[in-house]
Image: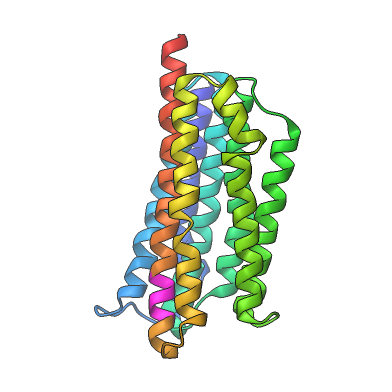
Amino acid sequence: MKLNISKFFTYALAATFVGLPSMAFAAEGNLKSDDLVGMTFWLISIGMVAATAFFFLETQRVSGKWKTSLTVIGLVTLVAAVHYFYMRDVWVSTGETPIVYRYIDWLITVPLQMVEFYLILAAVGAASSGIFWRLLIGTVVMLLGGYCGEVGYLNAWVGFIIGMAGWLYILYEIFAGEAGKASADKAPESVKSAFSAMRLIVTVGWAIYPIGYFYGYLAGVDTAGAADALNIIYNIADVLNKIAFGVIIWAVAVRESESSS
């Protein structure tokens, strides 16, 4: 019965996504063949839909302690997919950077991704609530700094520095803080491997965002060129940092579930 419910939910989800383009305002503009930025928005919005269906269906394949982790990463790609439909239409219709939609997406999805570090450790009994709260605080500081710098509430350099401080705080926690130590000392090898891969994405993959911010707001390039580059950089980063991040969690969940069955 659970499997049928899962399939019904996934199919209903897919049907909802089919209607999303008409719910937005794509009718005001059409994607042009030379609009590389618009193409990346289209490709990623559909990729997020496919990833969401995959992660939700795969919750039926893993053992109970991993279901929450897969459900959460499915929610990450679900929220991202919805926002990418709207971000895509903002770009195609106006040519403007959809800053507000992007940060609303990040304010929901990035904390959920940080929760995943806690969840995979909790699944093997190696996590405390302190890990959850420290990662959440670092995430909020990072995103608020970046948003305030991008929309002009703070000087661009000040917002950049605050955002970097939040990111460095997260890196400290997952490398040298309690989360990093719990992974090294208490987790089985499969979880250590996944934790390390997720940590690599947060280190290398997330580095793409400050590079995009710097190029778009601090490098002094022309406005149109900066907007194009910024959106392409952010879009590519979201593929790596959401879908690839989720695939890592899925892989360890399947491996752990099959080894214990």
Q: How is the image coloured?
A: rainbow
Instruction: Using the image as rendered, state which of residue 13 and residue 166 is in the foreground.
Output: 166
Percent x, y for residue 200? 45, 44
The question of residue 20 being in magenta is answered with no
Magenta extent: 227-232
The answer to which quarter of the image holds residue 164 is bottom right
Which residue shows up at 43% across the image and 38% down it?
A: 197
Secondary structure that dominates the magenta span: helix
Is any atom of residue 209 visible in this view? yes
- Which residue is the extreme one toward the front? 176
Horizontally, is 65 left or right of 33 in the view? Answer: right
Give the vertical position of 1 relative to 193 (above or below).
Answer: above
Which residue shows up at 57% across the image and 20% down it?
A: 64
Which residue shows up at 64% across the image and 23% down it?
A: 126
Give the vertical position of 209 relative to 8 (above or below).
Answer: below
Percent x, y for residue 87? 49, 70
Percent x, y for residue 245? 45, 43
Instruction: Using the image as rendered, state which of residue 153 and residue 182 is in the foreground.
Output: 182
